[in-house]
Amino acid sequence: MANSNEKRVLLLIETSRGFGRNLFQGIQRFVMENRNWTVFFQDRGLLEGTADWIKKWNGDGILSRTSNLLLYRQLREKNIPMLELLGDGNKIPGNILCDENDVGSVAAKHLLSCGLRNFAYFTSENTYWSRMASMEFENVLNRHGFECLRYPHQRKSNCGYAPLAVLEESRDMICEWLISLPKPIGLFAATDLHAMYVLSAARSANLMVPEEIAILGNDNDQLLCQVVIPQLSSVDQNSQNIGYLAAKTLDWMMKGEPAPTKCTYVSGAEVVVRQSTDVLAITDTDVAAAIRLIRRRFSDPTLSVPQIAAHLNLSRRTLERRFQESFHRSPETEIVRVRIEFAKTLLRDTRLSASTVALRSGFGSSEYFFRVFKRITGMTPNQFRLNNQSVAKVQ
């Protein structure tokens, strides 16, 4: 006998991309915690249109990602609670979306942290979500006194997502553009697919990655990022948390709560660093040596600014001044930043306790680690792990 409280939910979310697959993991976590959903899913691509079987399906709620207006209308005609997780920025309003401003900001800050002074953004189409990310990417660079160069040949798209446009772009045009860019340069691509294509074009143009062009993708699709050489650094858009929040909101709506009247933008994007941005483009050799020392010895809790200065035969004041001039932050800030980033990796990818993470990341005590981590990320280590770690989500 069926449970009267059980809800039948249709998921129209693509599994062809890492973003969609990560959404599924977030939804899965909610389902495992609540166990009152029966999920219906049919494997589809992101750009697929209407389907006759949808007309016959009966259920209680829908989570969808579509930029197809006819499909969107078909789903709306079901007259049941529904949340759209993509939309087209025009006729199809999104309900819960990634904060693209956050994506652009963390992308810019990552490439700035590499010591780069030239920057570019690549996309082959003009979509609403890529415009938002690229504008904030450029805004952050502008605030630091830098410009953003853009690929000049964009295709106009009638839908909110046109990933295949990049595959139709002229390889020669992309190669010529890459060759024309000042070097070294940090390049942020609209998606990992775009980043892969830029990487291939760079290889055809005999350009070195990351030494001449540091390439940063977007989506953190591990199937794409890890199949190429060098492996691609990419922005993880926190899509697992988007999926969890979407499922939780839809569950409220199916219990009679009103639909949200405004779009919710979910932040928390993080750069997953791989080989394609593993570069340090700093002309001051002493500052570069200091940064290499920090990255090599950050796990030593005794590492200090006076110790680094002494190692380089510099006064502390001279090191701090030159560090600020070259890197726009203090050496102490860089030590803490590197330790926090490593701690995030351990929290995301292992089951180590937070106290063990603190010690392995170079913090002298758990209490100090918790305090600094909360100040910088706005979350406790356990909250960060819950929102970001895949192994934690299946416990």
Image (cartoon, grey):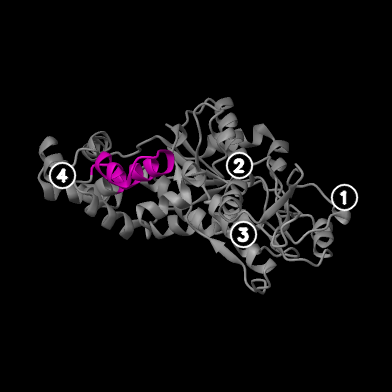
Range covered by the magenta-colored residues: 337-362
The front one of 345 and 90 is: 345
Question: Looking at the picture, does residue 228 appear above or below residue 92?
Answer: above
Q: Quadrant of residue 177?
A: top right
Q: Earlier in the sequence, mark 1 or mark 3?
A: 1
- Which residue shows up at 65% across the image and 32% down it? 172
| Disc ID at residue 18 | 2
Across and down, in percent, residue 139 comes to 47, 59
Q: Earlier in the sequence, mark 4 or mark 3?
A: 3
| Disc ID at residue 246 | 3
Question: Disc 3 to disc 2, how far (Cα)?
Answer: 17 Å
**Crowding at label 3, few (<14), some or many (≥20) Cα neighbours within 10 Å?**
many
Residue marked by disc 1: 53
Is label 4 or label 3 in front?
A: 3
Count all numbered tags in the image, as a single digit: 4
Could you tell me if the residues under marks 1 and 4 are in contact, i.e. CB atoms within 8 Å? Answer: no
Residue marked by disc 4: 304
The residue under label 3 is which amino acid type? Ala
Q: Earlier in the sequence, mark 1 or mark 4?
A: 1
Q: Earlier in the sequence, mark 3 or mark 2?
A: 2
Q: Secondary structure at mark 1?
A: helix
Question: Disc 4 to disc 3, how far (Cα)?
Answer: 44 Å
Report if residue 333 is visible in the image.
Answer: yes
Q: Is residue 116 magenta?
A: no
Question: Disc 2 to disc 1, how far (Cα)?
Answer: 26 Å
